[in-house]
Image (tube, helix red, strand yellow):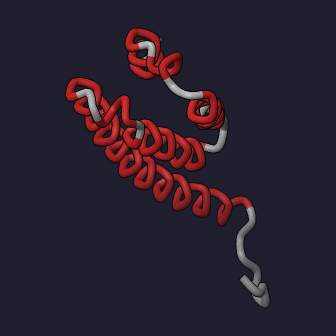
């Protein structure tokens, strides 16, 4: 079980939220579920961290505020790593594609 689930479950945060906040958090959490679209996931996870940090339950609890600051730092590191990986992936893909589909004289690209 990930840190996210253990923190949310242990603190009972979702149960303490009003209906509208609870729905938004659950929707963001569901949207952040891993899929094949890593860049979108990271953005959605950033949205979730930002939304959670804006809640009064987090703002008014020093321990939880520190945990979410740590989550935010970890996510920033992931974004940086993902950007590097994506760039390397695109370069490698284009190199392989160039071998499979070599440019011919007169091609537009």
Q: Is residue 7 above or below residue 85?
A: above
Q: Nearer the viewer, residue 30 or 103?
A: 30
Q: Is residue 105 above or below residue 77?
A: below
Q: Is residue 4 above or below residue 24?
A: above
On the image, which quarter does residue 65 sit in?
Answer: top left
Q: Nearer the viewer, residue 60 or 11?
A: 60
Q: Position of residue 43 (x, y in %)?
A: 52, 49
Q: Quadrant of the C terminus?
A: bottom right
**Residue located at (56% from left, 59% from top):** 90
Q: Position of residue 44 (x, y in %)?
A: 55, 44
**Residue located at (33% from left, 41% from top):** 72
Q: Nearer the viewer, residue 78 or 4?
A: 4
Q: Is residue 59 above or below residue 50?
A: above
In the image, farthest residue toward the bottom: 106
Tell me if 95 is positioned left or right of 48 in this view.
right
On the image, which quarter does residue 103 sit in?
Answer: bottom right
Q: Position of residue 101 (x, y in %)?
A: 75, 65
Tell me if 6 is positioned left or right of 72 in this view.
right
Q: Nearer the viewer, residue 12 or 104?
A: 12
């Amino acid at each position: 079980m990930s840190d996210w689930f253990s923190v949310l479950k242990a603190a009972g945060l979702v149960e303490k939220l009003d209906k509208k906040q609870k729905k938004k958090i659950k929707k963001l959490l569901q949207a952040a579920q891993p899929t094949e679209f890593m860049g979108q996931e990271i953005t959605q996870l950033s949205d979730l961290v930002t939304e959670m940090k804006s809640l009064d339950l987090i703002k008014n609890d020093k321990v939880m505020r520190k945990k979410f600051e740590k989550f935010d730092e970890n996510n920033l590191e992931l974004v940086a790593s993902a950007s590097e990986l994506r760039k390397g992936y695109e370069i490698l893909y284009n190199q392989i594609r160039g071998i499979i589909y070599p440019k011919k004289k007169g091609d537009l690209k």
